[in-house]
Every structure is written in C-alpha cells, then in structure tokens.
Amino acid sequence: MKTVKPILISGREVFPIIEGGKGVAVSNGLSAGAFAAAGAVGTVSVVNADSYDENGDVIPQIYTAKTRRERFEEMIDFSIKGGVTQVNLAHEKSQGNGRIHINMLWEAGGTQRVLKSVLEQTKGKLHGVTCGAGMPYKVAEIVAEYGVHYLPIVSSMRAFRALWKRAFKNYPEWLGGVVYEDPWKAGGHNGLSNVEDPKVPQDPYPRVAELRKFMNEVGLEHVPIVMAGGVWYLRDWENWLDNPELGPIAFQFGTRALLTQESPISKAWQSRLMSLKEGDVYLNKFSPTGFYSSGVRNNFLNKLKARSERQIPYAPKADETNTEQLTIGPRNRVFHVSAEAKAKAEKWMNAGQDIALRTPDSTLVFCSEEEALEIREDQRACMGCLSQCMFSNWADNEKGTTGRMADPRSFCIQKTLQAIAHGGDLDNELMFAGHNAFKYADDPFFSNSYTPTVKELVDRILTGD
C-alpha cells in the first residue's frame, strides 16, 4: 500500500480523508471535531442540526405555528441555532487541528439564509462548505464574503462545468475542492441524470478523469477532487494515489464513519449496520425531492414500494381505453378506468386498501384508512424543509406552493429523519446508507462488536485497511 500523504484542503495540509456530511443530526460537532483532531477533515451537517438545553439534552424540534409559512420560520430558527451549536462543538473538539467543514443541501428550505447566518456567527471556526443536492450556483459568492472555501458536490464533469462557467469562475481562489459523488454507490440522495441507468453502475475512474481534464483546462490543477460514494478500504483505490491523470485526490467516508464512538447514531442503529447484506441498500425514487436516493431496505421503504404498486391510471371522461366506471368512497366519486385497472382496484379495496388518493400523474393509489390519515396529517404539518416538496406541494416562494398536486406516493422526509436520528424505530423510518454498508459484517476492524474511536478509524484507513 502506498503511503497516504497529506494534501492541501481548505487552506491547510491534512490527511486526504473527509467525513461525509450525513443528513439530519448524524454528522455532528462531536464526530466532525474528532475527524479534525485526527488531522483529517470533519463535516458538520447543518440540516436541522441539534441544539441543546442547559442540561445538555437535545431540544426537540417541535413545531407549534399554525401555518406552513410560520412553521418554515421556526425551522429556519432551529437550523441556525443547531448549526452554530454544532460548529462551535466541532471547533472545540478539533483542538485547532485538521479542517472543519459544514454540509448544506442546496435544495433544502431556506438554505441561503441558514448558511449566511451560520457563517456570520462562527467566524474563524469554519474552513469549508460542501454543498450538493441541486446546482449551488450562489454558494461561492456567499462563502467568499466570509473567507471560507467551498466544495461543490457533483456527479459528472458536465455538472461542474455548468457551475464553473456560470458562477464559480468568479471565485476560483475559494474553491477548496470538488466532491465527485458516485450516483450509484453513495448514500442519501444521488445525482443520477435522466440519461443514466440506475441499474447499470459506471466505473468512477473515467468519470473522475474527465472531471480532472476539464479542471486542468481552466487552471484548477492544484484543486483536489474528493472521491465520495463506494469508498471503504483505501487499498482498493491505491492506483488513484499519486496518479498524474487524477491529480490531488482525497476520499470521503460517510457510511464507514457511522460506527464510531463519536457517532451520534443509536446503538441499535449501529448494530443493524453490522447485520446488513449486499443488496440491502438500494436506489429508489420515493424521496419528496425528486432525486434518487439510497436507503436500507426495511418496512418503511417496503410500504412506499407497495403503495406505488397499488396504482392505476384514470381519466376524467370515458375514452377508448378507460371504458369502465369505478365508484369510490362515501361520496361515490366516479373515475373512468380500464377494465384491467378496475379489476385490480376492486381486489385492493376488498383487501382493506379502500382509500384512493389522486397523484399529479393522473393515477390513483390505494391505501388503508389509517395510512391515508397519516399521509394527510403529515402533509398538513409541513414545515417547508425543502425548497420544493413533491409530498406536500410546499415551495420556498411567495405563494408557498409548487402549484402542483401533493403526491401521496412520497413521504415527509423531515419527520422520518428526525425520528431515526433520535431513537426512532429502525424498521419504520428512513435509514440512509451507502451501498457498501454490507462490508461492516466482514470488516475485521469491527469484529466482536468493536466500536473504534474516530482517531482509531482514521489511523486504520491510512494503512489501507
């Protein structure tokens, strides 16, 4: 195994190891500070991050306002306070070593307001901002004002080229790195384009080489590329180190960093990771963001899958295809469907899935009364955690709506991620993970239920194992 050498990231030479920013309350100040203290890069997720009361207990993010707009303002307040709290904690734990980054989701609700407030209140404690889940054109302009580096998350050269030409070329000195996130292997939301097949993964090497070629053409030879998604053992990536075609390279560890002493996830969650098998994490498109995402196959995703499968098209008027009338509900609403669709619907209704919910795609999905009630309650309780939400039809605009019908085939992502991060039922909440999570079971470092410190994990990674 080649020696892993420090490289320049966000203004300082550090080990080319970066903690992945993992969603709601999962990459926090304690874990990020530990990565930085070990001479690497820690990442605080500033997506509804936790803040604490005077006793050190997590303050529950409970929304009391009556309107979505008012709840949206509550959420912004929670996000800013939590982000500042966790950055301060990371700074303290780092003891002045390594680098501290924050992770922002560009398509989260109020991202620009939250980012500016966190940067303003943590001056001198933050070194970089990673930002993905969309096209973060304005992130460079925002962070440059505070003397902080930015690291966009992209899944192709084309995406970075668009960002560079439109905005980033005006702030080259603050580009701290470019995160290439494998859209087939990464956990959480994935950047698959419409022309890429989710079932046919592509080798990341030529895609990263293509990204580097463009970066070299615009004078970014010195800027590191961060390989994210599918990284477990560095020995598997040895040919990427000291590779002139790829230039300076770093590696992001998201899933493997979940099982450490500093990780805030529950013991039950950590234990569940140890039991995963290959294929237990899969790409799906149930997220209210509209992006593909990678999660652990459990009852939560199984219910969403089954709900979407109980679906038929309908027409407002009879036509050549939709010749049958389907009468549904106490109001005897009539929908025009095909004979085949009617037979399916009657079978589902006879089995207790007798509530039909309309979708934006002129289809009906069938579910139980209990499930329908939960869907409607979650839609009404929306607090605007996304800039645009398919599930509730919220949008961060003057009207507060996407203008489209809410989609019952999705779910409230804020609700479930808050729940699982704070002790919720692992089988009935969304559990994001990278596709290599099954490797926990065979990784000798975690044998006999051993839970290392972040420092021990970083030291282990540096050996190639």
Image: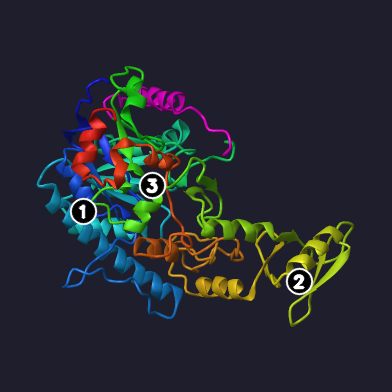
For mark 2, what is the residue? 350
251 part of magenta stretch: no
Q: Residue furthest top?
A: 244
Asked if 300 appears above or below 451 in the picture, the reply is below
Q: CA distance from mark 1 to mark 3?
A: 22 Å
Q: Quadrant of the N terminus?
A: top left
Q: Secondary structure at mark 3?
A: helix
In the image: residue 95, left or right of residue 447? left
Asked if 420 appears above or below 293 in the picture, the reply is below
Of circles 1 and 2, the one toward us is 2
Q: Residue at x 71, y 72 (%)?
A: 354
N-terminal label among 1 and 3: 1
Q: Is residue 20 visible?
A: yes
Magenta segment: 198-223
Q: Are marks 1 and 2 in contact (CB under 8 Å)?
A: no
Query: Is the residue marked by circle 1 packed among few (<14), some (14-19), or many (20+) residues within 10 Å?
Result: many
Query: Is the residue marked by circle 3 packed among few (<14), some (14-19), or many (20+) residues within 10 Å?
Result: some
For mark 1, what is the residue? 30
Instruction: Give residue 162's quadrant in the image.
Output: top left
